[in-house]
Image (tube, coloured by chain):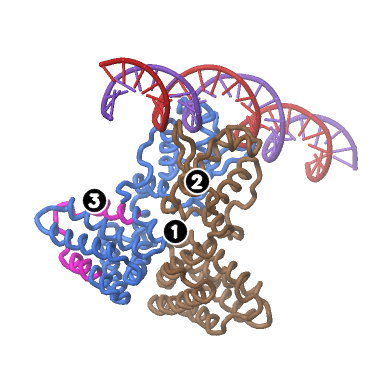
Chain colours: A brown, B blue, C purple, D red
Amino acid sequence: MTTAGQGLPSQGLHSQVLDTLGLAITAGDYPRGSVLRTDEIAQRFDVSRTVVREVVRVLESMHLVESRRRVGVTVRAIEEWNVYDPRVIRWRLAGSDRPRQLRSLTVLRSAVEPVAAGLAARNATPEQCAELTECALGMVATSRGQRLGEYLQHDIAFHRVILNASGNEMFARLGDVVAEILTGRTRHQVMFDDPDPAAVTLHVQVAEAVREGDAVRAEEVTREIAVGALAELDVLAPDPAR
Amino acid sequence: MTTAGQGLPSQGLHSQVLDTLGLAITAGDYPRGSVLRTDEIAQRFDVSRTVVREVVRVLESMHLVESRRRVGVTVRAIEEWNVYDPRVIRWRLAGSDRPRQLRSLTVLRSAVEPVAAGLAARNATPEQCAELTECALGMVATSRGQRLGEYLQHDIAFHRVILNASGNEMFARLGDVVAEILTGRTRHQVMFDDPDPAAVTLHVQVAEAVREGDAVRAEEVTREIAVGALAELDVLAPDPAR
DNA sequence: GAGACCTAAACGTCATACTTTTTATTGCGG
DNA sequence: CCGCAATAAAAAGTATGACGTTTAGGTCTC
């Protein structure tokens, strides 16, 4: 099981420069249209142009920047960024864009997870059903008594299993995103309170529905969970008029 | 308006090698675990190692491969690929993985678009409403008489407006995906028949609902469109047991 | 003032040398 | 025969310098 999100290490000059630059760009330090020169970057980070070029190529593949002859490396508009790139997501969640990014991702999640749960009810293997039940039980067991850390782990595992069991690779790849959202929520929001008992119950019901192959109910109940997540978001970070 | 999907040009050595290698890998020519050496690649394409290294770095950022010292560049399992990367999507749609990819994307679309339509009903600007109506009218006008090409353009524009009007950047970025799906459908399936009149009506109704700010109805009707798309898929490419 | 021409700036590509990490082999001792 | 440690080699990582190619922007002419 993939326990860690991809690519934290930052070992090697390449990764370091990439991380720093990517973070700076996604944070808005270089507004759209800003021009960077490879030589300047090389000097600033005290690395060779070789390294810088590779970094630029990767940033370019993420559509964060565009490199053109005689002009330099220009920062693209946010509308062009590959916002599904896990690294872009991580950068934005780590930077000043975090609230907006969190909202976008939660809305995406609220759209995807119910459908994924419905598919999971049809496609889940017995092993996945067992794992799901185990996760739900774990959530129940840790839902009281300031055990938020453990609860979070079960919660993440639960949603991962659902997404994987859907049998859709696009859904499955959102596991890390959901994990990130849930982690962020626990860390920033209700660090002290125990989780909402109603939410716990809903998760148990989803596990039941999937086990019984009741796709409609699985989808319906998951949609309720999603509604809760959205409501939570509105409390935490009120919609900035858009 | 972004009319073209990103990055078709393939100008420059870098892009050529990247495209060739990316296509080959996503097509499964190099099974998971295969090892490539940069020197070999350089020789095979008759380019310098510089170019190859930049290509490898980009492939690595897509999680298609992993580069390690003393061992080489190894192809990762498909479960690790960044399947939301537009270029990966294009490669897979162009290769032998097309049916599977098309199914995944259609399912994703069927989950996202209804929610996007609901949001669009709340957030769409008057201009977007007008554009939407225009698209729907265009679809009606070209729905009879073997004008599939024109119809397709209106159809694509319609869905793009919906996704953009949702106000969610993650949804908006799926515009190219939807365009690709619709294009592929027209090209491969019913090149001769006129589009289903029922589908046309549904689109008109969505435009109406959005214009009236009726989020529930917009979502509902869009969900019917999605159901149609999924059904269509089952006819064209029967579910391979998963 | 408009158009053709020219220059220089920045990226793109190549070649080479050297460094670093990691794997596999070899060889020693138990 | 087995295990551990020293060692050698393979491949990527990094640095440097040179040259090619494109193109923005200035210049010159008419």
Q: Which mark is residue A169?
A: 1
Give x and y (percent) for residue C29.
90, 37
Task: Please give the residue where the numbered disc 3 appears in the rendered image.
Answer: B188
Q: Amino acid at mark 2?
A: Leu
Say whether residue A211 is left or right of residue B196: right
Q: CA distance from mark 3 to mark 2?
A: 28 Å
Disc 2 sits on a residue from what chain?
A: B
Residue bounds of the magenta highlight: B177-206
**In the figure, residue A148 lies in which quadrant?**
bottom right
Q: Residues within 10 Å of mark 2 (few under 14, many from 20)?
A: many
| Neighbourhood count class around disc 3 (C-alpha, 10 Å): few under 14, some 14–19, many 20 upward | few
Proximity of marks 3 and 1: CB atoms separated by less than 8 Å: no
Crowding around mark 1 (Cα neighbors within 10 Å: few <14, some 14 to 19, many 20+) is many
Q: Is residue A63 visible?
A: no
Q: Report which residue position mark 2 lands on.
A: B64
The image shows residue A183 at horizontal and vertical percentages of 59, 67
Circle 3 sits in a helix, a strand or a loop, which is it? helix
Q: Residue at x 52, y 36 (%)?
A: B54
Q: What is the CA distance from the residue labelled 3 to the residue labelled 1?
A: 23 Å
The type of residue carrying mark 1 is: Glu
Location of residue B211 with respect to B11 vertically, above or below = below
| Chain letter for the residue marked with disc 1 in the picture | A
Residue B140 lies left or right of residue A159; in this view the side is left
A129 over A67 or under it: above or below = below
Q: Name the residue located 49 percent from the left edge and 47 percent from the top edge.
A: B62
How far across and how far down the image is residue A105, in percent? 48, 64
Instruction: Reply yes or no: does residue A121 show up in magenta.
Output: no
Q: Position of residue A217 (x, y in %)?
A: 41, 80
Mark 3 on the same chain as mark 1:
no
